[in-house]
Image: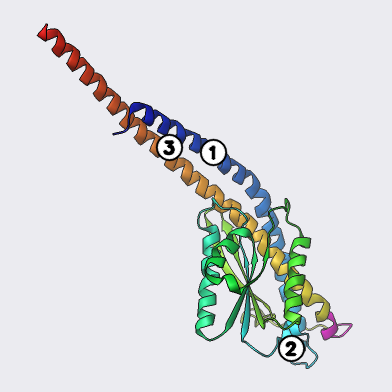
Amino acid sequence: MASLKDMRVRIASTKATQKITKAMQMVAASKLRRAQMAAEAARPYAEKMDVVISNIAAAAAGSSTAPALLAGTGRDQVHLLLVCTGERGLSGAFNSSIVRLARERALALMNQGKDVKFFCVGRKGYEQLRRQFDKQIIEHVDLRAVRQLGFTNANDIAKKVIARFEAGEFDICTLFYSRFKSVIAQIPTAQQIIPLVIEPPAANAGPVALYEYEPEEDEILAGLLPRNVAVQIFRALLENNASFYGAQMTAMDNATRNAGEMIRKQTLVYNRTRQAMITKELIEIISGAEAV
C-alpha cells in the first residue's frame, strides 16, 4: 500500500497535470475562433470556384483538347492519396480519424489491384501511415514552422502534386481532411481533386445559365484548374486547422474533468488512509496506557 507521502506526491502531480490541460484548453479556445472564421470564410470561394469551373468544364468535357486536370489520363490504375493532418497531437481522435479514412480507402483500392501512393501533409498523419505504408509514401510536407497558414502554403503543395501528375506518376488524386462542423464534431472527408469531378446540377436547381467565354473554354480551364487544386487544398488546410483546435479544446476539457475526478478519488483515499493511521496510533496509545 502506498505511503501518505507517495499519495501526496501523486495528488500534487495530478493537480499540476490539471493546470496544464486547463491552460491548453484555454489556448485552443482562443485560437479556435480565428481558425473557425478563416475556414468558414474560405468555403464560399471554394464552392463558387467549383460552380464556375463545372459550368465551363461541362462545355469542354468532350473536347479532345480538354486539359488533363479535367479529362484525366484515361486510366484508373495509380491513386495518389493526399492526406492532410495536424502537426501536433493531444486532440482526441482528430488525426487518427483522417488516417483511418485514408487507410480504408487505400486498402480497398489495393484489394482491387490498384497502385496506391501517399502524399502526407502534417507530421501526425505521416507518423501513423509510415508504420504500414512506408514504401508507398512519396512525399511529406511539414508545416510546423508555419505560424499562420496562407494560400502560398497550399499553392506550393498543389504545384508539387500537379508536377507529379504531369510526370505521369498517378492517375487520380484524392484529398483527405477533416471538415469543421462544430467544437464537438469534425467530419473526416475524402474529395477527388484530380481529375476534376463535375457534379450534375440538382433536380430543383432550375434552368442552367449559359455563358459565352472569351478566350475559349480550354484556355480558361488551363489557368483555372491548377488554381482550383490549390484552392481546394487551402480550404482543406483551413478546415483542418479549425477542426484541430476544436478537437483539442474538447480533449483538454475532458482531460481537465478527468483529472479533477482523479484528484477527488485520490484525496478521499488519502484522507481515509490518514484517518486509519491516526486511529491505529490512538488505539496503541490507549492500549499502552491501560497496560501501565
Disc 2 vs disc 1: which is toward the camera? 1
Is the N terminus in the top left, top right, bottom left or bottom right quadrant?
A: top left
Q: Residue reaching furthest right?
A: 215
The label number, if any, that marks residue 61 in the structure image: 2
Please state the total of marks drawn on the protein image: 3
- Identified at 39% across, 39% down, the residue is 261
Find the magenta span and give its range: 213-220
Residue 276 sits in which quadrant? top left
Mark 1 crowd level (few <14, some 14–19, many ≥20, 10 Å Cα): some
Q: In the picture shown, does residue 23 fall above or below 84?
A: above
Q: Secondary structure at mark 1?
A: helix
Disc marking residue 260: 3
Q: Amino acid at mark 3?
A: Gly
Tell me which residue sits at (58%, 70%) in the image.
Answer: 134
Q: Amino acid at mark 2?
A: Ala
Q: Quadrant of residue 181?
A: bottom right
Of labels 3 and 2, earlier in sequence is 2
Q: Position of residue 271 (x, y in %)?
A: 31, 26
Write the residue at 70% across / 70% down.
47
Q: In front: 224, or 291?
A: 291
